[in-house]
Amino acid sequence: MTRKYLLSVFAILFVATAVSFTVSHASVGRLRAIPAMHARRADHTATLLPDGRVLIAGGMVENGVFLDSAELFDPSNQTFLPAANMLSRRVGHTATLLPNGKVLIAGGSAGRLSEGGPGIVATTEIFDPTTGRFTAGPMMTSPRNGHAAVLLPNNKVLIIGGTDQDERPLKTAEIYDPATNRFTTTASMNVARLPRPAVLLQDGRVLVTGGWQGSGIASRAAEVFDPKTSSWTAVGDMTEPREKHAAILLADGRVLIIGGAHENTWRPVDSMEVFDPATNRFTAIGNMEAKRFKLPDGAVALKDGTTLIAGGAAEMELYDAATRTTSRVASLPDPIYFASATRLHDGRVLIAGGYGSGINRANGPLSSDRAWIYQPQ
């Protein structure tokens, strides 16, 4: 065996051992480490494909080191296989599964302007699972980074907010039509923001909550987009300001709002609240076991109606909406900020990448190549 292979096996065994001692109760399921990805990644995208594989695309290794590489997770043997590279490096982009099984990759930062990179881009590309290749897509109407993308009931994709080339938050939104392969502008939000996450409600509207507004305290404001009228309507404010939080559609149609931070600092919160689309109101529902932020893609609804909260901290926990309680699943050696959690067709969850605190690193946090499978009970 090579030294690199031995180190990889040791790392997997170490994480698996650390996890095995922190599983709290059998009823919350089990977390176990699997072989690592081919690249260290955080703020990447993870898209469940119709054939059950997961496309992992882009992200960053560390500050300023962005990736054009992609890989595919095969759930049958729980391994990652290299995929073709994207046409551009991207971090802060979106990936949306289209009705034809292809994936729309949109925007993001392709390299810092201050370092000679192209900065925030309006370019898009399309991944075709049948060929395994990325091809150029149409240009968005505006460059965007940290935006949100939602597939609407009419099979079009709503692109929302983000930041522009000067890192100013955007109010604007646009629509991608797969039938014409074009982007067109639609009504702007009432508030400029980084809207990740955005949630498609059961009635077809899209909810955006809080987000970064350029400086100072995060927003409490929330609004919904109605694709029938192509308009935004403000709804009741959240109970507290939040950015870099998560939002999950519950089985009863309400939306669970998880964690985040009040301002652009390393001070996450442990609070949660729910949005009721019938009343357009938010209600506080208590606290998690861990404070967490930087988890817009780090929580996922499970088939039994519970929610796995995996990212934004070292602890993973399960939230049960029926009892309004959380249960510890596992504790990792380090937090996983901007990790991805993807529910597979069989109900298991793939958790991949993310980064820790980055203490004593000149170039900030170093992303991880680690991955885990969560098996619900």
Image (tube, rainbow, N blue to C red):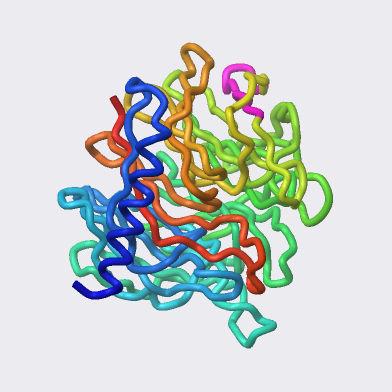
Q: Is residue 273 magenta?
A: yes
Judge whether residue 202 can be spotted in this image. Answer: no
Q: Pinpoint residue 248: horizontal percent, then vertical percent.
A: 50, 33
Relative to 326, residue 144 above or below: below
Q: Image point 60% across, 69% down: which residue?
A: 143
Tell me if 260 is positioned left or right of 62 in this view. Answer: right
Q: Pinpoint residue 288: horizontal percent, then vertical percent.
A: 59, 27
Tell me if 223 is positioned left or right of 40 in this view. Answer: right
Q: Image point 63% across, 78% down: which residue?
A: 112
The image quadrant where one finds the N terminus is bottom left
Q: Image point 63% across, 67% down: which residue?
A: 364
Region in magenta: 271-281
Tell me if 173 is positioned left or right of 304 in this view. Answer: right
Q: Image point 27% across, 34% down: which residue?
A: 347
Q: Pinpoint residue 13: horizontal percent, then vertical percent.
A: 31, 52
Q: Quadrant of residue 270?
A: top right
| Residue farthest toward the bottom in the current orientation of the protein | 116
Q: Nearer the viewer, residue 311 or 165?
A: 311
Q: Quadrant of residue 377?
A: top left
Secondary structure mostly seen in the magenta stretch: strand
